[in-house]
Every structure is written in structure tokens, then in C-alpha cells.
Amino acid sequence: MTSTTMTQPLYTPHADTPRATLSGIPFGRLVRVEWVKATDTRASRWLLIAVAATTVGLMLAPIFSPSSIDQSYTSYLGFAAVALSILLPVVSILTLTSEWSQRTALATFTQEPRRMRVITAKITVSLMLGASAAVFGGLVTAAGLGVAAASGRTLDANLNPGLLVAFLLYVVLNVMTGVALGALVHNSAAAIVASFVLPIGFALLGRASQLVAEWLDYSTTFNWLLNGEWSGHTSQILVSVILWVAIPLAAGLLRTVRREID
Amino acid sequence: MITTTALTKSYGNARVVSDVSLHCEPGTITGFLGPNGAGKSTTLKMIVGLARPDHGSSTVGGHPFVDLPNPTRVVGTLLDPSAMHSGRTGRATLAIAARMAGVPTTRVGELLDLVGLADAADRRVGDYSLGMRQRLGIAQTLVGEPEVLILDEPANGLDPEGIAWMRGLLRDFADRGGTVLLSSHLLHEVQATVDHLVVISRGAVVASGRLADLLASSSLLIRTPDPENLARALRAARIDYQPGPDQTFTVDVLGGRVTPEMVARVALEQQVLLTELRQSDSGGLEQLFFSLTAAKTAQPQEAAA
């Protein structure tokens, strides 16, 4: 800790490299850094383990209850979809809110003052996590179906590429509701609570009002998407995406870019 | 190099920073000194683009901070050592900073050694003391080999040994041609570390310049067993004086126009014995600091009365 040890890491002026005109941070590097930040803490690792465990755990339901649960490919895949939609949005929420709750925004936005690039990188990471989780969900479904088939059951192979795309969209859209909420509500606890309470609230309201249920309650509209029931529901699905993803995300980006950081 | 021009910022009706202009040259350490709530942190945040000035501007290395393509290669910023992810290790925190800056991650180990955190590198930052976070924060500012350091209260939480260590580190950094701007309300720490000073009170700069110049502009204390003859001699030499207790006089140096040599010569010519002749500022910067900030604080009250 004396001056003899500090010769190397300190600044030594280089006349030949004007630092202020170095090239900017490539977007790929921002994405890599945000990927690390989203996955390298104890909390995020446990959360990802919990996502995996929930998926595997819920897959046991159709395997062990063949009499009460429809034994079809889509039914099994539906369990993976529901499992991923519970905790995966929380991972996305934390990716965005931890900058504020842990106050790392102070460092992050002095490392890259173009805040929109940082947020875009975080959204990219969330989409990558969502897509990876969807693939994982697909593999768990395949394993579940394998076990069911091995036990001698006949399974309805009612899956088609369109439904697989719908499954991927369902997972990604659920992730995006978390992203949007995290971008808007700059507090981890509040955003997580909102992500669980708001859908329940809208589901309850939906019991009282057909309008709310069919247009605003995304658990209903996203289920139409998951089950491939596009026809007649396309506008409802779009309206709920605008309400739960587009509007809060746009407001959140605006807030993040304008906010003063302390 | 850091330059700000008339930075001004209000929150609601409260003006927290008012026309703050400062200039930090390469090779110097500038102390940004003021009591808590004087607007130091807000000024630093405006310089690094975390807060928007109402008007005024600032540049770091000749460019507005937010226009720097890769800021940490130019300026290392430490605004709050507690603003680190508590669930991440010290090593991981620095590795992220190194990746962002685009420097080899081998630098992480070097920096952990430099700041004395090699043994604690794989512990979570949440388990660090404030002093350890401060050291980690210093390491983080150095990741990108910047030419400028901006540090808000870097001595907070450091023990005397740590403060001495940081003083050496910053001196070394400046001696290599780096520019340092650090804020503090710890007067003694600043006095021993900086060579330039900007004193801020209630959002406005009340004094700035070289530390030596600011300290020199105080007064002389003279002691004599023969006060009557000394008073006569000073009057004859047209030097204003204030009689003090215990046969002392204080003489304002008037920004260097009155020197100890001048006083000694006056006494010699009039055959007056002096038993003491020195700079009277026993508290050094502390006295300057309190006089400047107290005067500034008192003024608005007088105006209101």
C-alpha cells in the first residue's frame, strides 16, 4: 500500500492517444456486461434456479395426474409456459430496478451516459433470457412427455410449429411485462409486488366486467395467444400488450433518460 | 482538465448551485471544500451528467462529459462508495467496470492489490466496511486509466492510515499529469492533500485559488514586551494594527503587501524588541474556511433584517 506498489495501475499520460476521442462502447459489449450483471449475483442465481425448479416441478403435475389432466403435447407445454411466467418476469424486473435499489445507476450511467443504450442492452438481455428459458421449457416438456410415453400412455401429439412460436411469444411477452414494470417502477420491492398484485387485481375486475376480462386482463389474452386462439382475439391481445408492455415501457424509458440520479 | 462555467441548479425554489465556475489543470489536486449541503455533490453530479444544470456548462478533458464516447477511459468518478451492488464481490464489481471500459481484466487484480483489498476481493461488497468500499471505489475510478479523477468525499470512512495512503496515491496520480477534483468537509484532510482550493458555501464559490495564496492572505501575530513603542513605530510606518491580549498585535498582511520582514525592520529601526512574529492563523485553513462560510452565511440575514 505504499507508493512503490502503485507504479503500474495508475494513469500514465500517453501523448499519442487522445482519450476523449476513443471509440465508444460497442453495443455487444454493453449486452455482455448486462448479461453478467443479470446473472452474477446470489439473488439472481437463486432466482434462475427457482425458475428451473418451478418448471420441472409443475411438469410433474400432468405426469402424476393422468386422470384429471389432459394428456396432450400442448397440455404439457402449457405447464412449462405457466411455470416460466411466474418467476421469469421477476428476473427481468430486477435487471432494471436493481440499478436504482442498489444505487449502481450512479456508476452505470457514468460508465455509459447514453442511458437509452444501457436500457436497450438490458431489454436485449431479458429477451435472451426469455428465449433461453423458453428453450429450457421446451426441453423439460419433451422430457415430461418422454416419461409419460415411457409409462405406456397414449399422448395426443397436437403440437404444430405455430403453437411452438406462440409458446415462445407467450414467454417473451410475460418477460416484457416484467421489463416494462421494472423500467417504470424504479424500486425492486414495489415492482415485484406490482407484478403479482396487478394481474390478480385485473383478473378479479375481469369477473365483474367482461370488458376488462377480454381486453385488459393479460392472463386471459396471453392464454388465447398460448393456445393459438388468435382468430377473433387478435385485437384484444394487441390492446393488452399495448397496456402492459408498450405504454409502461415507453413511460419508463422516458423517466430513466430524464431522471436525475442520486 | 475540468472546466465548469457558471453552473446553476435549483430544486423547486431552492437554488442549490449558483454560478459555479471552476478550472482544474493537469498535474493539480483541487479541493472542493464546503460545509454539508453547500452544493458540492450536486455540482459534481452536473459535471458527470447525472444531474442537469439549469444553465451553465462543464467539460472534462475538453468535452462535455455526456459526449465522451467511453467516459471511464477519460475520467474516473466516485460519488458514493455505498452505491455498489451489495450482492456482488469486489472482484466482480471491478471486472464489470473493466469490461465496460474495454481494458484487460488482468487490471482487476493489480487494482485490488493497489487498494489493499486483495484478501477481501471475493467477499460480497455488502460485507465491506465503508472504508473498504471507499478503497474499492477508488480502484473502480482507476480501472480505465483515466486522466481525470472526480471524487466526492473520498476520505469518508477511511482511518488515518487510509487517508495518508490515499493522499500519496492522489499526489502520485497528479504528479504523473493527472487532474484531481475532490470534495470534502474535512478541512485537515484537504489542507494536506490539495494544492488548489475552491470553497463553496450556499451553492456559490466564496474563494478559489492556490492553497498557498489563500493561506497567505491572513494576518501576522506580533508579541513585544514594549507595546507602546511598537504601536508608535507601526503608526509611523503606516501599518494598521489591532492590539490583542498579552502584549500582542495583529496585523493584516493585505494580500502580501505587509510581510514579517517589513514588521521586523520597523521594530529594528525603532529599537523595539520582538519576542514573537509569525502567521497568526493557528487553525490555518480551518480559520479561512469558517470565516468565508460564516461571512457568507451571515450576509443574507443582514440583508433581510
Image: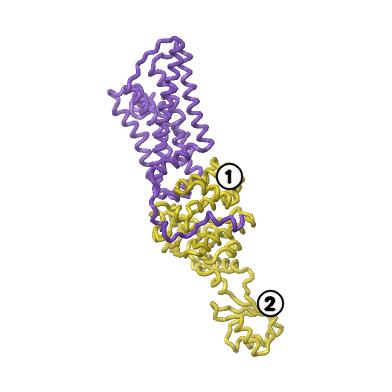
Chain identifier of the residue bearing label 2 in the image:
B
Q: Circle 1 sits on which residue?
A: B121
Quadrant position of the N terminus of chain B in the picture: bottom left
Marking on residue B1? none
Taking depth in this image into account, of A194 and B70 the one nearest to the observer is B70
User: Which chain is in yellow here?
Assistant: B
Circle 1 sits in a helix, a strand or a loop, which is it? Answer: loop
Identified by mark 2, the residue type is Pro
Q: Residue B281, located in which quarter of the rendered image?
A: bottom right
Q: Nearer the viewer, residue A148 or A79?
A: A148
Residue B251 placed where, x, y %? 60, 79
Closer to the N terminus: mark 2 or mark 1?
1
On the image, the x and y values in percent for residue A260 come to 43, 50
Question: Which residue sits furthest left?
Answer: A232
Q: CA distance from mark 2 to mark 1?
A: 58 Å
Q: Few, some or many C-alpha atoms within 10 Å of disc 2 (few <14, some 14-19, many ≥20)?
A: few
**Residue tagged 2:** B245
